[in-house]
């Protein structure tokens, strides 16, 4: 869906696909509920973080850089977040690269332990979001001929 309507989504309100099949509607609604929980950073969905903070030194965000080979993000010469796959690092919402923007918005500041936990949770939520979007893409292909489109 996101690929098919990519250009349209950039310039107008999204189209909402409605299916005539109640079973399919319930599957999509369940995925939507999962996405809501993830995007609200509900703790039960983030119990096992995919990223972690490592290194010695302080948590001051000096320069944000990504190491694709080792899947980690440095915030200064000593501190880093590891366990961040490229697809998560590169994930964009509204024209912004989420993981990078979150850190760059805090450049020059010392991250608190709460902010560190939030960043790890954001990374985890994005990783799970990508999985859900992939399952929705598969579901959308299955029912593409059985949908009604409604504009908001």
Image: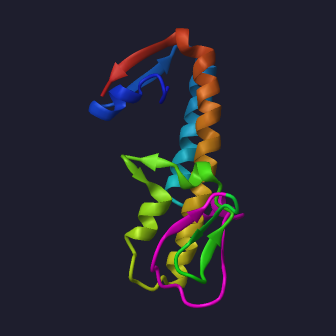
Residue visible at 60% across and 18% down in the picture: 141
From the top left corner, tell me how far across and down residue 65 is, in percent. Answer: 52, 67
Residue 20, placed above or below residue 40: above
From the top left corner, tell me how far across and down residue 127 is, in percent. Answer: 62, 51
From the top left corner, tell me how far across and down residue 90 is, in percent. Answer: 53, 51
Q: Would residue 12 be seen by someone viewing this image from the given angle?
A: no
Q: Residue furthest top?
A: 145
From the top left corner, tell me how far across and down residue 93 is, in percent. Answer: 42, 47
Given residues 34 and 103, the one toward you in this image is: 103
Residue visible at 41% across and 62% down in the picture: 101
Residue 101, placed above or below residue 55: above
Residue 29, placed above or below residue 103: above
Residue visible at 49% across and 14% down in the picture: 147
Residue extent of the magenta highlight: 43-68
Q: Give the main secondary structure of the magenta stretch.
A: loop
Say which quarter of the image contains residue 47.
bottom right
Q: Is residue 103 magenta?
A: no
Q: Is residue 64 magenta?
A: yes
């Amino acid at each position: 869906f996101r690929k098919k309507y990519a250009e349209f989504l950039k310039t107008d309100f999204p189209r909402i696909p409605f299916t005539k099949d109640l079973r399919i509607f319930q599957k999509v609604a369940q995925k939507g509920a999962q996405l809501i929980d993830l995007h609200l950073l509900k703790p039960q969905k983030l119990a096992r973080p995919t990223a972690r903070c490592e290194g010695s030194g302080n948590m001051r965000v000096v320069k944000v850089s990504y190491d694709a080979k080792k899947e980690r993000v440095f915030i200064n010469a000593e501190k880093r977040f590891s366990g961040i796959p490229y697809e998560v690092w590169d994930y964009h919402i509204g024209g912004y690269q989420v993981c990078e923007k979150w850190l760059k918005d805090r450049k020059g500041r010392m991250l608190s332990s709460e902010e560190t936990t939030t960043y790890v949770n954001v990374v985890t939520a994005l990783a799970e979001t990508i999985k859900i979007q992939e399952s929705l893409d598969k579901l959308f292909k299955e029912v593409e001929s059985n949908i009604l489109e409604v504009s908001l």
